[in-house]
Image (spheres, rainbow, N blue to C red):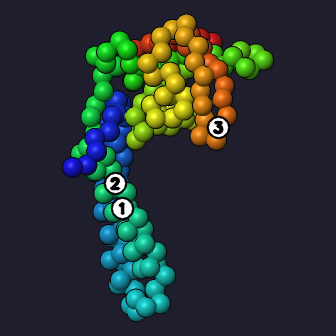
Amino acid sequence: MAQEHLITQEGYNALLEKLKELKKMQAENLIAIQDARGQGDLSENADYDAARNQQAKIAAEIAELEANIRNAKIIDSEQVNETSNLGKYVTVQFLEDEEDEQETYQIVGTVEADPVNGKISSDSPLGRAILTSKPGDVVTVRTEDGDRFDVKLVKVNVKKPTSKK
């Protein structure tokens, strides 16, 4: 049996939308393959080769997305017990930063992780360190390369906090 993975409803919906887009691209690419086939000799047809390679790439992405959707377990941050921050928005303060910088992240499953957009995996060093922490806790984060740094969990929100400008 395939391993289930945790994902927020928002992340699940994004997977469904991406699958829909890829299936549309697949249909369009099939037309490109047929058009290239109509150009004659396939052994020296660069358009045909490119379209076939694109089709293989799209098919692989679709298979991966379908597996992720099939094995997804949607997490509801409001129903996750109080000892877990999974699916919640956490604000952390990096204590060794001279400015005591604060960042807000959403802790998500690995399939949905996107650190650039503030979604960190519960399996990442920072995610693991703060997954069961409560506001006010100071924890040490240990990175894969052995570095360590301390963070303070400032607050936990079930809903995405509104940004103040």
The reply to whether callout 3 and callout 2 are in contact (CB within 8 Å) is: no
Q: Which mark is residue 64?
A: 2
Mark 1 lies on residue: 60
The quarter of the picture where residue 28 lies is bottom left
**In this orientation, does residue 133 appear?**
yes
Element on which disc 3 rests? loop
Element on which disc 2 rests? helix
Query: What amino acid is at disc 3?
Result: Gly
State the residue lying farthest toward the right. Answer: 98
The quarter of the picture where residue 79 lies is top left
Percent from the top left, x then y, of residue 105? Answer: 52, 24
**In this orientation, does residue 17 appear?**
no
Percent from the top left, x then y, of residue 161? Answer: 49, 14
Query: What amino acid is at disc 1?
Result: Ala
- Quadrant containing the C terminus in the rendered view: top right
Residues 62 and 136: in front is 136
Residues 145 and 94: in front is 145
Percent from the top left, x then y, of residue 13? Answer: 32, 36
Choose mark 3 or mark 1, whichever is in front: 3
Q: Is residue 74 left or right of residue 152?
A: left
* Residue at image location 21% in from the left, 49% down from the top: 1
Element on which disc 1 rests? helix
Measured in 3D between alpha carbons, the distance from the residue under mark 3 to the one under mark 2, in whole angstroms, is 32 Å
User: Which of the two discs, 3 and 1, labels the residue nearer the N terminus?
Assistant: 1
